[in-house]
Image (cartoon, rainbow, N blue to C red):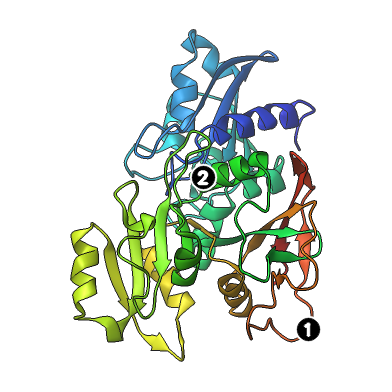
């Protein structure tokens, strides 16, 4: 059973782990705390992909290593039990003689999946599992989705007015939300592995899709362009970030493909299905490239398609305190795009404000 202080120290693990957001993928975000006699004597987090794991950094930070055999190690994700880019963390814990380990949630990776916990128990270590388990799973929801569903986590990002419009009747849509909300969108971009956009949105907005209003990495930019309609002069084909373009296999051999490749764009052909690209095949191709999470910024038609195909996991809906009136374009009723019959049920997280704009974060109930 968890002890009274276990929750407190696990929250510290989560706070530490979050510092690795945008830097450790395709690894999970992990934080670790070492406690002796009610005091934290060491802590660390996984700082970058390929670098030491959280437990290694936490152990290394302890100035008096003689205290380790009398301490408790906390970690939000089960310690690994296999050799990857670094040695197994479970072996290090055993070697240092740490007598008790508290774990937030199990690691679904096939090479771990309970083996780390089993190794610790077999060595006589007291193991407590499931402390703040829901919070620990949410933090690494993309990692968990990837290793349980063999697909990236898919989030839809939309901005709309209070009357549910994403653009005026003339198609004007830029800056529905305020600067604080736009900064949050850039922060989200920095922690998602990829952003997806349609060629129609490129032609309408000429979006760059880089991180500019906060610090952080640029995501992989993914363009869905079945007929290669996006202009070569589009900002998204610049060198600021890596770009992949998915197009129909019917476009193979066209001169524009070579022109895109000369600009550094990776072009991937997927089989045509009706009048759109196969979104599931797109996601599977991204999964092969170790993309754990994607954020769809391609507008209402593309978002509706992901929902209809049952490929979306969550929605970030930014609501601006504005009204466009009856002639505006609705978020989920674009030009013949229909959602599945019946209601699409959502489970909301706590709402948050960015300036005067309201962010509703919700998971699709499947």
Residue 79 visible: yes
Q: Residue furthest front?
A: 170
- Viewer-nearest residue: 291 or 61: 291
Residue at the spot 62% in from the left edge and 70% down from the top edge: 300
- Viewer-nearest residue: 26 or 185: 185
Q: Position of residue 173 (x, y in %)?
A: 62, 60
**Under tag 2, what secondary structure?**
helix
Residue ID for mark 1: 342
Q: Position of residue 288 (x, y in %)?
A: 36, 64
Q: Position of residue 223 (x, y in %)?
A: 40, 66
Label 2: few (<14), some or many (≥20) within 10 Å? many
- Callout count: 2
Residue at the spot 36% in from the left edge and 33% down from the top edge: 51
- Viewer-nearest residue: 342 or 169: 169
Q: Earlier in the sequence, mark 2 or mark 1?
A: 2
Q: Is residue 140 left or right of residue 211?
A: right
Q: Position of residue 104 (x, y in %)?
A: 64, 41
Residue at the spot 48% in from the left edge and 57% down from the top edge: 195
Q: Residue furthest bottom?
A: 274
**Under tag 1, what secondary structure?**
loop
Please tell me whether residue 119 is drawn above or below residue 108 in the rendered image: above
Residue 290 visible: no
Please tell me whether residue 271 is drawn above or below residue 68 in the rendered image: below
Q: Residue furthest top?
A: 64
Q: Is residue 74 left or right of residue 6?
A: left
Disc sitting over residue 95 in the figure: none
Label 1: few (<14), some or many (≥20) within 10 Å? few
The quadrant of the picture occupied by the N terminus is: top right
- Residue 314 position by quadrant: bottom right
Q: Is residue 239 left or right of residue 140?
A: left
Disc sitting over residue 191 in the figure: 2
Please tell me whether residue 273 is drawn above or below residue 114 in the rendered image: below
């Amino acid at each position: 059973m968890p002890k009274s202080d276990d929750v407190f120290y696990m929250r510290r693990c989560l706070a530490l782990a979050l510092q690795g957001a945008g830097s450790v993928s395709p690894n999970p975000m992990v934080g670790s705390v070492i406690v002796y006699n009610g005091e934290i004597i060491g802590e660390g987090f996984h700082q970058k992909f390929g670098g030491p794991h959280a437990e290694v950094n936490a152990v290394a930070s302890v100035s008096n290593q003689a205290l380790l055999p009398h301490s408790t190690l906390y970690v939000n994700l089960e310690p690994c039990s296999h050799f990857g880019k670094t040695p197994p963390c479970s072996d290090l814990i055993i070697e240092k003689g740490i007598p008790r380990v508290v774990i937030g949630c199990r690691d679904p990776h096939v090479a771990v999946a309970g083996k780390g916990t089993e190794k610790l128990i077999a060595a006589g270590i007291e193991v407590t599992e499931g402390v703040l388990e829901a919070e620990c799973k949410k933090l690494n929801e993309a990692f968990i989705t990837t290793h349980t569903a063999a697909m990236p986590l898919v989030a839809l990002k939309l901005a709309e007015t209070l009357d549910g419009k994403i653009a005026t009747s003339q198609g004007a849509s830029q800056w529905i939300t305020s600067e604080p909300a736009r900064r949050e969108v850039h922060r989200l971009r920095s922690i998602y592995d990829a952003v997806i956009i349609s060629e129609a949105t490129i032609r309408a907005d000429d979006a760059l899709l880089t991180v500019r209003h906060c610090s952080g990495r640029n995501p992989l930019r993914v363009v869905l362009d079945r007929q290669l309609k996006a202009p070569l002069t589009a900002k998204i084909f610049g060198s600021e970030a890596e770009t992949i373009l998915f197009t129909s296999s019917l476009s193979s051999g066209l001169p524009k493909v070579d022109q895109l490749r000369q600009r550094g764009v990776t072009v991937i052909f997927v089989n045509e299905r009706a009048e759109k690209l196969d979104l599931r095949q797109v996601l599977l191709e991204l999964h092969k490239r170790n993309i754990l999470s994607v954020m769809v910024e391609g507008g209402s038609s593309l978002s509706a398609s992901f929902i209809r195909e049952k490929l979306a996991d969550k929605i970030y809906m930014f609501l601006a305190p504005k009204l466009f009136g009856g002639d505006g374009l609705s978020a989920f009723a674009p030009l013949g795009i229909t959602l599945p019959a019946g209601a699409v049920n959502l489970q909301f997280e706590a709402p948050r404000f960015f300036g005067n704009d309201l962010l509703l974060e919700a998971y699709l109930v499947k």
